[in-house]
Amino acid sequence: MANKNVWYGYMCFNLCDLLEFLKSISDLGLDKSWVVNGSRFGIVNVIIIIFIIIIIIITIIIIIIIIIIIIIIIIIIIIIITIIITIIIIISSHRIISMLHLLGNTFFSISYILFLIGCYLKAIETQPQFAVAWSNLGCVFNAQGEIWLAIHHFEKAVQLDPNFLDAYINLGNVLKEARIFDRAVAAYLRALNLAGNHAVVHGNLACVYYEQGLIDLAIDMYRKAIDLQPNFPDAYCNLANALKEKGLVSEAEAAYNKALQLCPTHADSQNNLANIKREQGKIEDATRLYLKALEIYPEFAAAHSNLASILQQQGKLQDAINHYKEAIRIAPTFADAYSNMGNTLKEMGDVGGALQCYTRAIQINPGFADAHSNLASIHKDSGNVPEAIQSYSTALKLKPDFPDAFCNLAHCLQIICDWTDYDNRMKKLIAIVDDQLQKKRLPSVHPHHSMLYPLTHAVRMAIAAKHAQLCIEKVQICHKAPYIYPDRNSVRKGQRLRIGYVSSDFGNHPTSHLMQSIPGMHNHENVEVFCYALSPNDGTNFRQKLMNESEHFIDLSQITCNGKAADRIHDDGIHILINMNGYTKGARNEIFALRPAPIQVMWLGYPGTSGAPFMDYIITDSVTSPLELAHAYSEKLAYMPHTFFVGDHAQMLKHLTERVIVKEKNDPTPIDKETVTVVNSVNLEPLLSKAEVKPFVREAEVAHGPERDMIKTEVVLPVIEVPTTEPLKQMIGSGMIAGNVEGVPVQNGLTTLNQTHVKAATGEEVPHTILVTSRQQYGLPDDAIVFCNFNQLYKIDPPTLSMWCDILKSVPNSILWLLRFPYHGEPNVMRFCAEHNIDTRRIVFSNVAAKEEHVRRGQLADVCLDTPLCNGHTTGMDILWTGTPMITMPLETLASRVASSQLYALGVPELVAKDREDYIKIAKRLGTDREYLSQIRAKVWKARTTSTLFNVRQYCSDMERLLHKMWKRYADALPPDHILSEREGRDPSDKTN
């Protein structure tokens, strides 16, 4: 409307100009003239020019009108000719039905669908027995996507004419598309009765058998079609599909090649042959064939999607996304492409985009089991375990034989302690993994989860090995020449040993909490330290500390190409490269698969074997990985002298080095009840100087020094007796941030650091306030024996919780303190305990807390009960740093033996149980013998600072010695071998031992 108004205004404007012009003529008279560009211009000349312009315009309009009339005449002539031809045919046949039918065909050819349908319907109305009209009308409905109407009309056609071959074939085709396979088979068989040598019908029937899972019948039918029509590339291609389904891969490959021999531009065969090459690990061949298929047929959505999957595997994620988008552009309802693009986006960290893709895939195809499973993985990773369980369950209902969904569902149920039908679930999971390994497929159980299930060492290693092989396949495409390593004699010639730590966890992560001081505490005259970060800077003090104290800190997160990342490491001349991720989140094992360093080592971050031929050693110890279990590792064992585990607690949580027990003067509770109210600070002097202090003295044999000499030691804990603890109780009960003890300001230790000092709450800085920690804060009875476990709930299995229930039964007035980690597991744990005759009021759950509080509140427990299936590793160090004894029971996996190693290093082997009965016996004694509990607690408390467990500087010295031993073997041209001697040499500057 706006454009019309502008045009109208423009016309009015010019009309006014014209009137004004004419007026000026009348005013001036005919004998006037003007000067135009310096010449005189008479009025007559102006009128002549205007007249000529008008004539030209009129001529143009007439020509346009004539052209339009000619076009209309041509159209009318075409229509008249068509009608005349039709009438001639009508006159010759004398049948009105044929006229209507033929008119239908005529209008079909020019896409007048509605008129066409009307013609066919009129023909049928006029002569209902006219089978051809019924069949053709079925074709129209089929073209429009009206499947049921098409089926009805084809069935009517064959009913009217039982020998109507084309109608039977069309009926079979449309029934096949509608997945009504039994009736489709019947239609095709009837067609074959009429024309037994019809190759296409044999081929179509074979397709139906294939869809029904009758692969042998399908193969027979395809072969029959080929016999009837040897130059039938479609049949060869489909035969190959069936042969591949039967596992006859070489025969399938030959059939695809035959199809391509007959028709080199057969894009389906190119694509399907590429799929075989990809599964064989021949990535380059597969890529070439996908590209060829797309060259033949650029609008081939499946080929775009398949090529994208290879690009994703190669780490070319953006290129993969581009091809997935192209596939979706071509086929907007391509659910597979949406689902796979979601996987790629998830790998890129775009969780929202992945969620949208999975949701769209399910909208397109609600029965798409893989999309439901992928959606479940998003829910699982985000901690929404119930939604994940629901989606995995849906996937399994749609596709009962779905190994990935089953194994991931099993892991989700493990996370929340849902042990319904646990034994049968484990049996099925084992059978799935065994079958996959036998068929050389990537197992559905992730290496990091394998420790949770009753698998053999061989199976666990095979699972890891398949993932390692996948890394090798990903980097083979790089065609990188082998690296030339540093001179074997470079260290002997005076160069420092260059060690490189590689991790995605340099930031606020348990791994950094444990080892953040190691780069700074290395002897830099002995080693040169490089840290390679696989994740971007998270802005925390943990990251900054590592950056500041490493001689070289390199952020590889921006170098997404594994080949280039490996080049960077190699260019730094690294002697020993240390893998701190294994198969945990954020790992880039492809870098290690390229072998940028001559020696590559597993350490700390992953509790198991890599199964990788490109990893030489695993740093461990004789308790965690005894020599008799060496067969469980693909790497050679390299022993640290005490424990391979390390903790930075003495630096990170310095304020927990000392503590004061708070007690009311008239409280009848024995003085040795040290776990009710505790005060911690880096400086307790203000409180001790004003309060009445009564030392609580105990004696214990405590481990001292690197040799763990047991020396009888006096352990003193200060106890302050206050007239009343009521002010503290009011502060805690009301949720106040601060209060006072004997006039000294103190801070409520329950979550308040999050409000007053966030970096102290996360463990990034040491708090300098005096913190009060009390059982009241967590709803724990003052007079109870508190057994605790602060692990994630997935580490608990039915035998463990059953054992804990027996301990509660044997220790009166005891409770079990657990974490809602996650909170969805709480009801299941409560239900299990109730079924084992435990009053659920004896099970206390607390929320997950920030790092500092998480560790500090461990002081309130009397004893920690470790999880034998998978020990507390970081949480084990956390609880021991608070002086709380931990009972463990080593099994055979690395993950189940770490706590034993920690306890041996601490000098308390009496807390390591031999079996279930011994575990219960130790717990019962600690729970019922107050004097023994007091002695053990004193021993653990003192050993924290006298043993090597929390001595990071000693750990660095021992580690340097071990790394030099590795390099010495390499320098002597010896292959990697177990390094078992624990005490050889003590001079860290000696580079020859």
Image: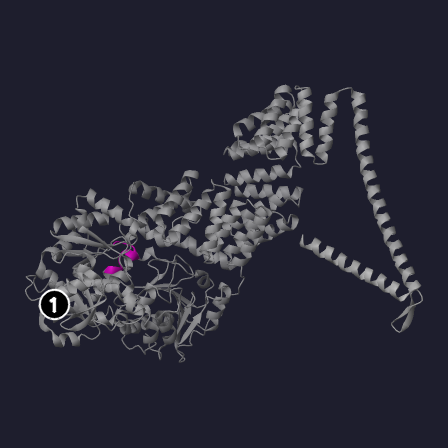
Which element carries disc 1, helix, strand or loop?
strand
Task: Give residue 753's quadrant in the image.
Answer: bottom left
Highlighted range, magenta: 891-899
Q: At which x and y percent is residue 274?
A: 57, 48
Which of 969/311 is in front? Answer: 311
Which of 46/671 is in front? Answer: 46
Task: Give residue 818's quadrant in the image.
Answer: bottom left
Residue farthest front in this picture = 27
Tell me what residue is drawn at x 17 percent, y 60 percent.
775
Tell me what residue is drawn at x 24 percent, y 64 percent.
855
Work out which quarter of the rendered image holds the C terminus and state it: bottom left
Q: Please, what is the three-letter code of the amino acid marked with disc 1?
A: Ala
Query: Is 895 a magenta residue?
Result: yes
Query: Is 321 a magenta residue?
Result: no
Q: How many marks?
A: 1
- Residue 528 in view: no
Q: Residues within 10 Å of mark 1 (few under 14, many from 20)?
A: many
Q: At which x and y percent is residue 719?
A: 11, 69
Task: Give residue 599's quadrant in the image.
Answer: bottom left
Q: At which x and y percent is residue 318?
A: 53, 58
Tell me what residue is drawn at x 46 percent, y 57 percent.
350
**In the visual, does 866 lie left or right of 330?**
left
- Name the residue beneath numbered marker 1: 700
Residue 410 to residue 120: above or below: below
Which of 417/901 is in front? Answer: 417
Q: At which x and y percent is residue 568?
A: 48, 70
Tell me what residue is drawn at x 28 percent, y 49 percent.
825
- Residue 256 in view: yes
